[in-house]
Amino acid sequence: MRSADITKTLSALVAEKLPAFIWGAPGIGKSSIVRQIAEREGIGFIDLRLSLMDPTDLKGIPFYDKDAHKAVWAPPSFLPEGGEGILFLDELNTAAPSVQASAYQLILDRRVGEYVLPDGWAIVAAGNRENDRGIVYRMPLPLANRFVHLEMEVHSGDWRDWALRRGLDARIVGYIGAKPDALFRFDPASDAKSFPTPRSWEFVHGILQAGMDAELLLGAVAGAVGDETAVDFVAFAKVMHTLPDTKAILRGEDVEIPASLDALHVLASMLVAQALDADDDTLAHLLRFTLELPPEFAVLIVQDLQRGGAELEHLDAYGTWVERFAFLL
């Protein structure tokens, strides 16, 4: 399933308190989706890494109750005691089988030992697939049967929408727009330590924001996404100096349109990022500017704006735009 579909499906499952397990390759944003759902709904979020625990860590430890004259279990402090939220068991299938077994009762019966999970909390788990060459244990069928299973795929369009809202560097967004296959290149048979994933492109954003010297940039980017992709991306990013002034475009001034397709991809991403929260006059200037662009870039800009929440339909310039590019819609 695409990440957008995973988000919608998981939101419904969380609302019904049905346990869900998200499967997918490393670095594609499984845990980010769960956290974002919690943030959007304004509910709690607890991330538990069972691979770092012993079986007794989840069940708690026994102590003698002198009043009841029996041993009782003291639940761990990291489990929720009230309210609403998502209890996220990340990398569940990397936990030892004995630890997974201790999670059976919590997942299905919403209790373990003396502890009872509050009604307002949902359980979501995630993990890599067995063929991804991660350190995972085969999930026992009794545990697997306790989840609704969702398999997440990488989709460059969904990622670009997220990256624009998140404010990732326009060179990265433009590069992925021009070369969607560069978003995710994971080969389980390869011994490469660095390869492109949605997570590693976030690292590249941080590298670009760090302002390091140009001669160091290629090596740092290669450390995040691999040598081949880094060389291609850095060459792509060098078109920045050929771009017109985006602020002038949004003011409605005439500028020279670059001829390079790479430059147009970066320019489109920069304009969308700067115009998502713009006023009507600025959006109208941008729409008029797109009339001078190759049709595929005009449509790309408008679709990205609409997916980002910009309202265009009430603008006169949008009517003109639709007349020009209706054949592509």
Image (cartoon, rainbow, N blue to C red):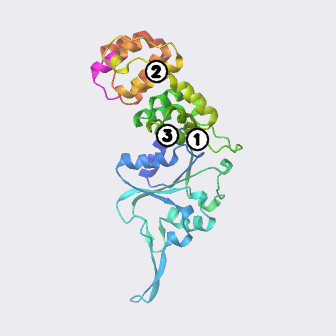
Can you identify the residue that label 1 sits on?
223
Q: Which residues are magenta?
A: 275-286
Query: What residue sits 70% from the left and 43% below the top?
Result: 190
Q: Secondary structure at mark 3?
A: helix
Can you identify the residue that label 3 sits on?
202
In percent of width and height, residue 96 lies at: 62, 64
Judge from the rendering whether residue 312 lies leftward or rightward of residue 100; answer left or right: left
Where residue 270 sits, quadrant-wise, is top left
Disc 1 + disc 2, Cβ < 8 Å: no
The number of numbered discs placed on residues in the rendered structure image is 3
In percent of width and height, residue 278 lies at: 30, 26
In percent of width and height, residue 49 lies at: 52, 60
Q: Amino acid at mark 3?
A: Glu
Residue 241 is marked as: 2
Q: Nearer the viewer, mark 2 or mark 3?
A: 2
In percent of width and height, residue 103 lies at: 54, 65
Q: Nearer the viewer, residue 147 or 238?
A: 238
Q: Nearer the viewer, residue 109 or 244?
A: 244
Up-down: is 40 above or below 108? above
Q: Amino acid at mark 2?
A: His
Disc 3 + disc 1, Cβ < 8 Å: no
Q: Sequence-wise, which precedes: disc 2 or disc 3? A: 3
Q: Nearer the viewer, residue 257 or 139?
A: 257
Q: Sequence-wise, which precedes: disc 1 or disc 2? A: 1
Up-down: is 140 above or below 295? below
Up-down: is 164 above or below 69? above
Q: CA distance from mark 3 to mark 1?
A: 13 Å
Classed neighbour count for the residue bearing mark 3: other residues with Cα under 10 Å, few (<14), some (14–19), many (≥20): some
Q: Amino acid at mark 1?
A: Gly
Q: Secondary structure at mark 1?
A: helix
Does the magenta segment cover residue 269? no
Does the magenta segment cover residue 283? yes
